[in-house]
Amino acid sequence: MKPVQDPEAANQRLSRRSFLKGAGGAAAGSVLATEMAQAASEAHTAEPEVLKGVVQVSFHLNGQPTSVQVEPRTTLLSALRNHHNPPHTAAKSVCEQGNCGACTVLIDDQPVVSCLTLAVRVEGRHVRTAAGLAQGDQLSPVQEAMCADDALMCGFCTPGFAMSVTACLEKNPAASEEEVRRACSGNLCRCGTYPHIFSAALKAGRAMLQAQKGGK
Amino acid sequence: MTSQDNGTPSWGARADHRVLNKDTRRLSGPEKVKGEAIYSIDRHVPDMLYGKLVCIPVAKAEFTVDVDPAMEIEGVVIAIPLREGSTLYNGQAVAAVAAETPELAEDGARAVVVNYTPQGFVVTAESAKAPGAPQVSSRSPNHAPRGGSNDKGRGDMDATMEALDASDFVVEAEFDVAIQHHACLETHGLLADFKGGDEATIYASTQVAFGIPGSAAGPLGLDRQNVRCVVEHMGGGFGAKFSMDVAGRAACLMAAEVGRPVSMFNDRRQEFETSGNRSGSIQRIKAGVAKDGEILAMHSDMDKLGGVGRGPGAVQPYIYNVLESFTLDYALHTNTDSSRAMRAPGHPQVSFAMESVVDMLAYGIGADLVEIRKRNLSDPAYHRQLDRVAQEIGWNEHQHRTAPGKGDGWIAEGIGFGVSTWGGGGGPGAAAEVRIERDGGVTSSIGVQDLGTGVRTLVAMIPAEEFGLQASDVLPRIGDTQLPNGVGSGGSVTTASVAPCLKDASHKTRLAFAEHLASVLKCEAKDVTFADGKVFAKSAPDRGLTWKDACATLPAEGLARTGKWIGDLQTSGAHGAQAARVQVDLMTGAVKVLKMVAVQDSGLVLNPLTWRSQVNGAMIQSIGLALYEGRVMEPDLGIQINANLGDYKLPGCMEIPELVAIVDDEDTRQAVIGVGEPPAIPGAGAIANAIHNACGARITSLPITPDKVLEALAKLS
C-alpha cells in the first residue's frame, strides 16, 4: 500500500479545479484538513469547472485498478455498491450520514466513511475494503481474531469495524483497549458485539507484533 | 463420542458432548469479516431497479398525490401512488418510484407532488389525554382499557387497598419509559426478483421467510407457491421484521407492473419513523411491604404507548410475589406508528418499574437488596442466580447494602439488581433434512433465517455431534423457502423449534447409516459407533473406517432423512438475574456503567460462544434503554426530531462496560430453550437501581440522562 504522500507535494497539486474534477491532480494524495482549507482559499482565484453528466473515476480497489462511471454527486459508497461492476458490497449502507461507520473504507490507509465521500474524490487513489484484507482463504490477523472471539453477530457492522480496527493496528499494533475503543468510536453495532471486538483487536495486535518480530 | 442411543433421540449427558455445549465458531464468520456475506440489501440482479418511498412529513394529513412529474425524469421507470385520502402518523408512505440508479430514484421521489393538509393530531401522552384532544382512532378513545371496554382491571381492588393500609411501609411513584427503537443496521426491505412470467424470488430482510410468499404473491399477481423467499444473511431484526412492510409491498407492485426486478429498502429516517419501536409506558404504582420484607400490596395503573397500536400485554406485578394486587392496563393512543415486538415486548418496561419499587420498599424497611428479592421470589433458580450475580458484582464488600449513598463528594458508585423470566420453548411445524453424500459431505437443511443469533451454526453442530464430526464438516443450508419449513424468529422460539427437528433428522440419518454399515463392519447396527471422524464396530475401535471411506460405501444418491419437531427435546421456562455497577458523576450527572453481570439459565446451551454474545447484546441494549435511547417527538409539529443514528443515541464503543455472561450451570435440564429475550429484560431496572444506590437519586424516567440525575440530586439537598 502506498504511504501517505508528502503534504507539501499534495498541496501543490490540489486545486479547486482538480478537486471538482477529481482528476489526476490529487492522485494518491492524502487530503488533510489544512489542504482542504487551502483548496477552498484557492477557489476564489482559480477558474471553477463544474462536472456534469457521467464521469469516469479510476482508482485502485483492494490493489486492483478499476473504474466506475458515475454522476459527480455519487458517493463512494453508492459507487462501490451500485455502480461498480461487479457490485462491491463489502461496505455496508446503514445511515448515509456518517453516523455509524458501517461503510468505513481505507483511502490511502486512512479510515473514512464512504457515505460522506464523493466517488470523484478517489480518482487515482487506493481504496481498501474488508474484501481486500484476506490473502485468499488466509484471513488477516484482525479477521481471524474477530472470528475466534465471536466479534460479530448479524455481521452488518462487521466489515466497517474490521477496517477501523485494521487502520488502528496498522498504525500501532500495540494499541491499548482504550485506543481501540477510540479508533472504533465512529462505528456502531446493534447486536452487541463490542466487548468481543475489543478483545479480538487486542489479540490481533499481539499476533501482528509477533509476526513483525518473526519477520525480523 | 456421540450418544449412541438407538431409541428415541435425546441430547444425552453433557459430559458426553463433543460439539454441542462447546464454544463453536460461527460458521458465517469468515464470509462476514471479509465482507462477502450477501445480505438482501446487497443483492443485485441484472436489469434491477432501485425503489424509493415518498412519505408525508406530518403526523396526520389529508392529501392528494401526483406521481407524473417523477416520470419526466430520465431514468425513472415507474412511479405509483400507494394510498389515497389520509395518513395517520408521521412518515407514512404515499407513493413509490423506481429508477435505474438509487440517485435517480431519489430525484424521482422528490419530483412526486404531494398536496397535503395537516389535520389535528396528538403525539405525546399529555396531549393524547387532554380534554377535547383529537382522536387517533374512530374505533376507540385515545385512552382505553387494553382488554376492551368491559375490562375493569385485574385483581381485587378492595383487598389491595386494605393490604396497602396494613403495610408497614408504602411507596408511591410514577414510572415513565421512553420509546426505544430496534435500529436494525440493515433496514426493512426486499428485492423482488421478477422479470415477468409466473415465478418470482424475494430476497428479504425478514424474521419470517416463510411468511413472505403469502404476502408478496398478491402484489406480484402470482400464486403463492410460485414465490420463493431467500434470506441468506440478515442485518438484525430484534422483533421489527415480521411483515414485508410498505417498502416490500411497493417493490412487488412496481416489479409486477414493469416486469423488472425492484430492490427497495427503507432509508434510515423511514426506519425510525415507521418501522419499529418498543412501546413507551407510564406506570403509576403504589406498593406496600411488611417489616419482614414480604410485599403485601401493589396497585398499578398503566398506560401503554403503542402509537396507533395497543402496545404489548406485560403487566404488574412483574415476577415477584405480591400478596394482593390490582392492575389497570390501558392503551394510550397517539398519532405515531404502532409499536412492534421488540426483545421481550413489554417486559423491560414493567421490570424497570417493579425492580425500582422493590428497591424503594427495601430501603424503606432497611432490608438488604438481595435478601428482599429472595424473600419475594419462590423459584429457587432466582435465589441461586441472585447470589451468584451478587458475588460477581462485589455486593458483599459494597458499602451501601441497606441504604443508598448520600450524594456527597464528586463520584459515587452503586450496585443494582434485577430478574427476568421468559418461556423460550418452541413449537411444531418446522422440519429438517440431513443428507450424507457418497463423497463424505454432510448437508443439514432447514429454511429458517438467522437474524444474527447463530442459528446457522447450530444447524451444522447438531448433525456433527451425531456423526462424530466437527461443525465445520457440515454444510448448513438455511434461509430459503425451498428448504424444509422453518419457523418465524420471534419470542425466542427459534432454537427450541428447529433444534429438535435437526436432532430428529440427524438421529434418523445415523440409524439408517448404521444399518447400512453393519454389513460393512460385520457387526450389528446398534454397535456401529461414530466418533472423532471415524466409524467402527463398538467391539473393534481399531479396525474402523474413516468417515469418508464409510460414506464411499453408500449408493450414488447418498443417504438422507427428514426430521420433525419432538417436544421432549425442548422445554420452556427461562430465569435470569442481573447486576449492574455504575459510577455517577455528581457534578455533571453523567452515569457510566462499570460492569454488568448476567446469570441466565436456558436448559442445554448448544453453543456457549454465541450464547454469550446474545446475552452481552441484551445487556448492551438494556444500557441503551436505561441511559441513552428514546424517540423524541416534536409535540406541535408531530414529527420525530431524532430519526437518525446521530441524534438517536445508541450505546457505542465508549459506553461499553465490562460484561460478564454466565450460564447457570445448576440448570441441568436436558432440553433446549431460546435465550433471545430474557437477558434483555432486567438490565434497565438494575442500572436505575444502581444509580439510586450510588447517590440516593431515584430516577423514575427512562432514559436516565444527566439532566434528570442533576434534578434528582438537587431535590435531595
Image (tube, rainbow, N blue to C red):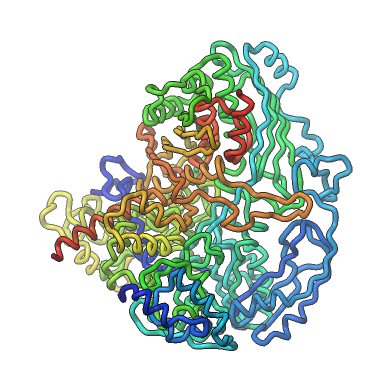
Q: How far from the left and from the top, in percent, is residue B580?
A: 46, 34
Q: Nearer the viewer, residue B541 or B585?
A: B585
- Relative horizontal placement of residue A47, taking residue B69 as reference (left or right): left
Residue B21 appears in which quarter of the rendering?
top left
Q: How far from the left and from the top, in percent, is residue B320?
A: 56, 26
Residue drawn where x is 65% and y is 72% of the image: B52
Q: How far from the left and from the top, in percent, is residue B72?
A: 73, 86
- Relative horizontal placement of residue B323, taking residue B24 as reference (left or right): right
Q: Compared with residue B195, is residue B40 higher up or lower down, i.e. above or below?
A: above
Q: Compared with residue B542, is residue B179 higher up or lower down, i.e. above or below?
A: above
Count of numbered marks: 0
- Relative horizontal placement of residue B184, taking residue B115 as reference (left or right): left
Q: Which of B615 and B17 is in front in this view?
A: B615
Residue drawn where x is 68% and y is 15% of the image: B163
- Relative horizontal placement of residue A61, taking residue B447 as reference (left or right): left
Residue B281 appears in which quarter of the rendering?
top right
Q: Compared with residue B441, is residue A204 higher up or lower down, i.e. above or below?
A: above
Residue found farthest to the front: A45
Residue drawn where x is 45% and y is 73% of the image: A35
Quadrant showing the C terminus of chain B:
top right
- Whether residue A61 is visible to the viewer of this picture, yes or no, is no
Residue drawn where x is 14% and y is 49% of the image: B539
Residue B358 appears in which quarter of the rendering?
top right
Residue found farthest to the left: B542
